[in-house]
Image (spheres, grey):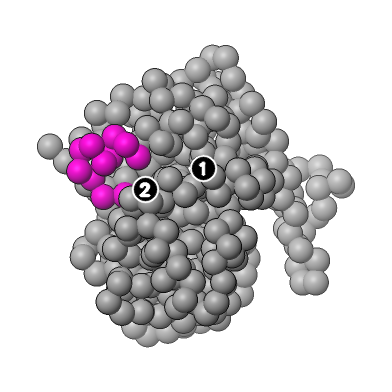
């Protein structure tokens, strides 16, 4: 029987951030949080009231336990996590910036436990309990075995008749564009919902043109009934092979941009799983805007707050 709305798999890291806008080189205190694209989506979906299961490979130590404790606190199932005593936790550091100085991200994730995941690490019968599987292009970039694990997850979902969404989410620091293209093309070919930033469509797949032409170009690479294209300051576009749907961005005062794309994915998925991906597009834009206003990777909000923003716009104080 289906127990979860969504199953997802990927690396979550421990994040360290200096307080305020202090630079890393002079920081004396670091705030600890956790974050990873797939777990960020899982938390956001759980905040919207969906049931979600997240799996990864984590070290048996306080940092690994920090991750599962955090996700469980939001109602995310972590029973599919594979524990190991022979690997380390992936870490990353964020130095917050303010215009014109950009934020700086420093990764320390080589040979992390998640990068060592293999297809045999997981009990794939958990997919029997989920309606939908969500994956990203980050996990297959971690290592050859992580790529094999992503391929296996996709195959298991297809074998069990589950729908699949995939966010390209290209990370140039993890792999060269040629390797990404070769690995991702087979993965995205059979997805039901493809999500791709406009810049990734050009850089990874060589598709250029208007957003509408780019979405159709991505559609030609896949059999996806839905293609969502994120446009940065231009909002987002959805093509359902019959019509284009556009969602405009909200004006935001950005506190922390990390995780905004994951919040968008969750909103889009919320609508998609309700049979209305076009509505999900607008919810995704609202959720991305809200995420910009809070520190950390995770979307700590609610469906009610999202709908208030969509229906009433911004208010300085809610009374």
Q: Is residue 184 visible?
A: yes
Count of numbered tags: 2
The residue positioned 49% from the left and 71% from the top of the image is 214
Question: Secondary structure beneath disc 2?
Answer: strand
Indicate the quadrant containing the C terminus: top left, top right, bottom left or bottom right: bottom left
Q: Is residue 162 magenta?
A: yes
Labels 2 and 1: the sequence-earlier one? 2
Q: Is residue 6 magenta?
A: no
Indicate the quadrant containing the N terminus: top left, top right, bottom left or bottom right: top left
Q: Position of residue 82 (x, y in %)?
A: 42, 23
Q: What span is colored magenta in the figure?
A: 154-164
The residue positioned 80% from the left and 55% from the top of the image is 22
Q: Position of residue 45 (x, y in %)?
A: 35, 54
Q: Which mark is residue 134?
A: 2
Packing grade of label 2 (10 A; few <14, some 14-19, many >=20) is many
The label nearer to you, 2 versus 1, is 1
Q: Which mark is residue 40?
A: none
Q: Mark 1 — residue?
A: 183
- What's the distance in space between the residues labelled 2 and 1, CA to CA? 17 Å
Q: Position of residue 70 (x, y in %)?
A: 46, 39
Check the image and report above or below for 148 versus 47: above
Q: Position of residue 150 (x, y in %)?
A: 43, 36
Which residue ends up furthest to the right in the rendered image?
26
The residue positioned 33% from the left and 50% from the top of the image is 190
Check the image and report above or below for 287 versus 50: below
Question: Secondary structure beneath disc 1?
Answer: helix
């Amino acid at each position: 029987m289906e127990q979860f709305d969504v199953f997802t798999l990927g690396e979550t890291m421990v994040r360290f951030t200096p307080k305020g806008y202090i630079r890393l080189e002079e920081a004396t205190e670091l705030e600890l949080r956790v974050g990873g694209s797939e777990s960020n989506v899982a938390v956001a979906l759980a905040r919207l009231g969906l049931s979600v299961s997240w799996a990864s490979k984590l070290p048996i130590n306080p940092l690994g336990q920090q991750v599962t404790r955090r996700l469980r606190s939001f109602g995310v199932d972590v029973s599919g996590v594979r524990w190991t005593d022979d690997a380390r936790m992936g870490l990353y550091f964020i130095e917050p910036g303010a215009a014109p100085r950009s934020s700086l991200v420093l990764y320390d994730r080589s040979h992390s436990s998640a990068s060592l995941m293999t297809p045999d690490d997981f009990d794939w019968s958990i997919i029997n309990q989920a309606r939908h599987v969500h994956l990203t292009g980050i996990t297959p970039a971690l290592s050859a075995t992580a790529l094999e694990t992503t391929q296996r997850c996709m195959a298991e979902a297809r074998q069990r008749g589950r729908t699949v969404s995939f966010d390209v989410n290209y990370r140039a620091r993890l792999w060269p564009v040629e390797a990404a293209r070769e690995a991702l093309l087979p993965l995205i070919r059979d997805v039901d919902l493809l999500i791709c930033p406009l810049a990734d469509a050009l850089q990874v797949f060589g598709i250029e043109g208007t957003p509408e032409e780019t979405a159709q170009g991505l559609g030609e690479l896949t059999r996806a009934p839905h293609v969502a294209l994120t446009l940065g300051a231009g909002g987002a576009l959805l093509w359902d092979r019959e019509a284009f749907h556009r969602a405009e961005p909200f004006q935001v005062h950005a506190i922390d941009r990390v995780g905004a794309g994951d919040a968008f994915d969750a909103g889009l998925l919320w609508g998609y799983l309700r049979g209305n991906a076009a509505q999900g597009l607008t919810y995704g834009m609202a959720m991305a805007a809200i995420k910009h206003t809070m520190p950390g990777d995770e979307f700590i909000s609610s469906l009610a707050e999202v709908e208030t923003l969509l229906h009433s716009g911004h208010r300085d104080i809610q009374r």
